[in-house]
Amino acid sequence: MVIAPTTAALLPQESYAEEYQPSENEASYLINQISTSAQQIADSNDLYASVMIAQALLESGNGNSSLSSSPTYNLFGVKAYGQEPSTWMSTKEYVDGEWETMDEPFRVYNSYEESLQDHAAVLKASSYSSGAPNYEGTWKSQTSSYTDATAYLTGRYATDPDYGQKLNALIEAYNLTQFDTPAQAGNTTESIQETEVSAESESTSEKTQTSSNTGSTYTVQQGDTLWDIAQNQGISLDELMANNGLTDQMVTVGQQLNV
């Protein structure tokens, strides 16, 4: 369900979450949590999923900030106005050439998906006074690449003068442009991968069953995370990563894991 933004929520955001440097594993975990929803929401709103996910990583400290955690789920530092459900927290603002810390009211959501939906609504909405879109420069149809969108956000969505550069660095580090492919096409590709993996698994099933040393395998499904797989298989996350020589928690649909 799309969250209808309030009048104030349509105004350019001036908040900027306190800078936090997440580890590679932490970043991968949040990407796994929100990438499917972000891809679908961005695709239906003419937005870059890569930019949306990068903003979530940067603004929320990879989901570790108090604001982005349960029960508030505010990934993007969206402020609350009027009678909206809110919580007061400290934030840093770039004012007159320097950072200042102040307390501000922030919106409360019921889930990450609600936060993603509201963020898309803000980027697609128009000013009530002029009727002009607030963030048209972030739309796919109005830009040539994601770097145009991140540049447009700088000084408009966030007061940090290096905001766009930080988003670009995250997009490149975690290959987030892979999520800019339309969600439907991505799902078709995943279905093809799953079919190919299934066929390969069937052709080698006898060898797997007769070998006592190979152990069992698990094929990654849509929405899976390494933590969920480890819990369901009754092993620790560290053991699962070690079994498969993984250095981060990124997995892809159709990937086979030794469990």
Image: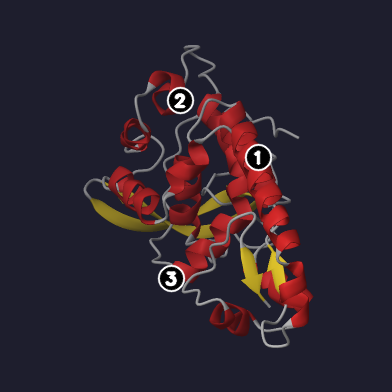
Judging from the image, what secondary structure is the residue with disc 3 in? loop
Residue 117 visible in rendering:
no
- Is there CB contact under 8 Å for labels 1 and 3? no
Precedes in sequence: disc 2 or disc 3: 3
Q: Which residue is mark 2?
A: 139
Q: Which residue is mark 1?
A: 187
* Direction from residue 142 to residue 222 in the image, left or right: right
Q: CA distance from mark 2 to mark 3?
A: 30 Å
Residue type of the residue flagged with mark 2? Trp
The residue most toward the top is 131
* Direction from residue 106 to residue 169 in the image, left or right: left
Precedes in sequence: disc 1 or disc 3: 3
Residue 124 visible in rendering:
yes
Q: Residue at x 62, y 62 (%)?
A: 69
Give the number of the disc on residue 23: 3
25, 167: nearer the viewer: 25
Colouring of the image: secondary structure
